[in-house]
Each structure stands twice: as C-alpha cells, then as structure tokens.
Amino acid sequence: MPRLPRVITIDGQAHTGKSLAALKLATALDLYLLNTGAMYRSVAHLLGEAGVDVLDMGRPADRVHALIEPWEFALNGQDVHVNGVPMPPTIFDEPMNALASAVSKWGEVRRKLQAEQKRIAGLHPHVVCEGRDQGTVVFPDAEVKFYFVAHYDVQVERAARKKRELKPHEPIDLAALRRSVERRDHDDKVRPIDPLRKADGAVEIDTSHLTPDEVLARLLKEVAAWQSPAT
C-alpha cells in the first residue's frame, strides 16, 4: 500500500469548497478530518454565551484567555464538542461567519486553537487539516499543501446556495452577501496575526469551474505525485 502523508493541509478563501474537498479527500484516503473553521465558530458561540462581545477588538483579553484555556475540543466531521458538550448546528449559519472571523483576529484565541489543532492531529497517524492558516502556521512542515481560490461571483453563488439550504424560505440580499464574502476574505488577509496567504510549496487550485469530484481528482493526483516523486 502506498505511504500516506502525515499531514495534508487545505487553506484558502471562503466558499471555495475547502470543507467539502477535505471531507471527500479524508474519506477517499481514510484520513482523520480536522475542520478548524468549526473550532473558531464554536469559540465565537461560546464566548457570546459567556457575555463577551466578539465584535469588540477592545475585549477583555485576560477574561477571554481564562475562559478558553480549559476548553478541550473533539471533532468528528462537522460535529464539534467542547469539554464534552456538543455545539449547536447554528454555528454554521451565515451570521456566524463574521463572528468567527472576528475572534480569529485575537491572539489568545489563535494560540489556544492552534495548540488544540496540534494536539488533536497528534492523536491520529494521518490527518487532513482544513482552514486558513494550516499550511502557513500550524503545520508548516506538512508534506502536501493546497490553497483554494475562486472568482468572487462563484463564491457568492456558493454562499447563497448554502444559505438557501439552511433557510430555504428566507430572502437573500445578494449585494449584502457579496460584501460579506469580500469583507471576510479581506479581513483575514490583512489581519496582523497569521494572515491568510498561500503557504510555501502549496498547490493552488482555482475551484471556480470544477465540480467537487474534479477537485477531489486534483487533490488525489497531487497526493499520488508525492507518493511517487519523479526521479
């Protein structure tokens, strides 16, 4: 049986198909899936429940640190548990995007979740890690790295489709949705801590006109190339 990479990372812009691609790749190769976006969404949810204004950059950092320090995460696909408590499906709703992006700018949150991501990855022989800083900061030595991009029109279309699936009877303001998608990517690219960028050695994939199966085929091709390097 061909050897498998210890770590495969998939970073990139919002609504480029990272989560689905990571799931399909993990399933195809029987790897553990680490969905880091779900972790940031969980933190935003739990801090909000604790009364912290996650949109306030002047937050009480000491209190935030004290709250999150004892949290231990367990992930199984889209399911997230924190200290054994399951997170609600609403963490994947569109309004949570801005809140998760906001807490991702906080150093105390990033350091905590990056440590948790390394801890969780250490429990499994082979992992696929999907997020915004996996190949650049958390696993810079990953054997195989990917960076996903897509045209903004496609990103907005995918965001709208997801919103319709979650709330089929709610009207969609496409202009506002586009601003939200653009702002999220822009904010993550310019944040002072661990900004979103293509990792050294990452294979860039434009998913704009690719089906999920075509994206998977590209990923598998690159993994196969790593398994059988040219001599």
Image: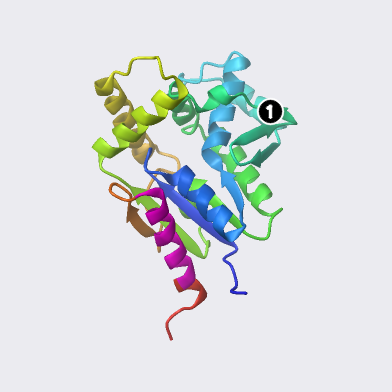
Residue 122 found in image quarter = bottom right
User: What residue is pinned by disc 1?
Assistant: 86
The answer to whether residue 162 is above or below residue 33 is above
Residue located farthest toward the right when viewing the structure as drawn: 84
> Seen in the image, is 69 located left or right of residue 90?
right
| x and y, in percent, of residue 163 in the image | 40, 25
Which is more toward the observer, 212 or 179? 212
Can residue 88 be seen from the camera position used here?
yes
Task: Give the magenta range.
Answer: 211-224
- Residue 199: in magenta span: no
Q: Residue at x 60, y 63 (%)?
A: 6
Q: Classify the position of the C terminus by image quarter.
A: bottom left
| x and y, in percent, of residue 36 in the image | 55, 41
Which is more toward the observer, 161 or 125? 161
Q: Residue at x 48, y 70 (%)?
A: 224
Which is more toward the observer, 97 or 25? 25
SS for tag 1? strand
